[in-house]
Amino acid sequence: MTPLSRRSFLAAALASTSVLAMPAHATGIPAFSRDTVTALARELATRSYAPRAKVPQDWLDISYQDYQTRWFRNSDALWAGTPSSYNVDFFLPGLYFPRAVQINTVDNNTSELVPFDLSLFDKTDKAPDLSEKGNLGYSGLRLRTELDQPGLKNEFCVFQGASYFRAIGLANTYGLSARGLALKTGDPMGEEFPEFIEFWLETPAPGQRNIVLHALMDSPSVSGAYRFDILPGENCTMDVEATLFARNELTHVGLGPLTSMFLFDQTNRNHFDDFRPAVHDSEGLLIHNGNGEVLWRQLANPKHLQISSFVDENPHGFGLMQRSRKFSDFADLEANYHKRPCLWVEPKGNWGQGAVTLVEIPADQEIYDNIVAYWRPREAYAAGAQVDLSYRLHWGHEPDLHLPRVINTAAGARVFGTPGRIVTLDFANHSLLDGNPDEFDLLISSPHVDTSKGVLQRNPETGGLRLAFSFEPEEKTLVELRAQLRKNGAAASEVWLYRWTT
């Protein structure tokens, strides 16, 4: 079997068995650390970008059905049969994954290449014959460990494709993804997709709950070194450290980027002939900005690309949330959208001035990820710059920001032939909403239209409050809306935001 043709100078230096059997300090080879990957990224940035060779053509030509005819055999996973607390499975290249990545393990501060081995995959009798020479390697990896079933190692995290990765908490099924970096998202000249080209997995000790993974990233504009400290559980948390080296000026960079899918809900249900009441991996963008304000931006599936920027300085956090948690919210026995995770980005240190940016792309099917959210720094990064950042990702439950949440947004035409649109917001039951609805101030506004004063009532099913108001768009094709409940001059709910379009 042939390992990847592109090998880091570290892996090449450690290629012989006699060297691998010896501790790094005994060979004169520097011990592996995060600094090792940073040095690789720094060195890459001094050279012109050179894309890695693709896998052989017959691997690229396989169909989706062909790709499904082979699957990794869990019994032969990395560290299977050892006391290590983790197993790691691998994915084949080809189809959507034209370039393989290099995967290494780290033990006693020494790195060792994981060679490609097609015999680790079972197959059906319909699996096509494929070449086993050339630039072959794995396209990604899957992490498994004991979660809520002692003695059974279950999966909870996948790294595969460009710089994409995803994880789940205990109650979740896979949904939205994160990325190492976003570049030029939504720009007219097209987006650039950085790729993780090499991974290093630190070998976990018996009983160790977390796992540490390092990744080397490369793209035409930037290289980078990443360290992920991953802890599964009720929520899966990841502490991310990244060091970026800009080859070119980075005028539009997205930090902590998230990618999800929103097709329809009760705001645009009439656009789809579908038996389900809603289809989405995420339904809203939640922001806790630097001023302490909590914003909820309901997602949309517009007819045309739209980009929204929420200007801020040193945000406390942002993320894409799935608040609909009942089966009846989606009525989908296969997709289980009510079990999709929320993903919260918690910046560490000073992220400075910039904007949480939301990109909404038109989509007509649920197979397309059409939602992107990220932090866009106000100032561009100069060519040659080094950028250090760190943040924590929370996969699973949404954060408790101590304010009543909007748990449903619905919209439609006003009844009885009255022109205009009506909007209803349901706020979750919360101690801040106790009392008579007349005690609350209703702050409803729009820079584009006049809105009604609104009506606030107790919702007997949720126990919370429902706010209803109307507006008349007339000839306007876009209307921004904002609403919040306040009591005695203080916030009694998060701020609801929505962009209505024809």
Image (tube, rainbow, N blue to C red):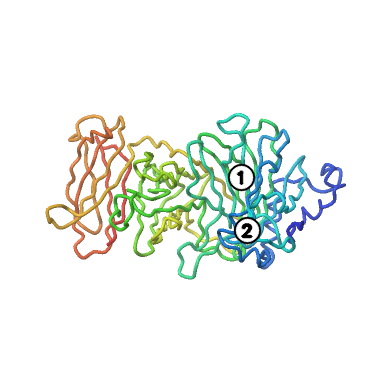
- Residue 355, image quadrant: bottom left
Q: Is residue 74 left or right of residue 380?
A: right
Q: Position of residue 274 (x, y in %)?
A: 33, 54
Along the line of sight, the residue nearer the viewer: 295 or 372:
372
- Does any portion of residue 288 appear in the rendered image? no
Give the residue drawn at x 54%, y 64%.
192
Q: Is residue 15 left or right of residue 39?
A: right
Q: Check the image and report above or below for 155 versus 446.
A: above
Q: Identify the residue position indicated by label 1 in the image.
A: 228
Q: Is residue 35 left or right of residue 425?
A: right
Q: Label 1 sits on what residue type?
A: Phe
Quadrant, the N terminus = bottom right
Q: Earlier in the sequence, mark 2 or mark 1?
A: 1
Q: Label 2 sits on what residue type?
A: Phe
The circle drawn on residue 245 is: 2
Secondary structure of the residue carrying tag 2 is strand
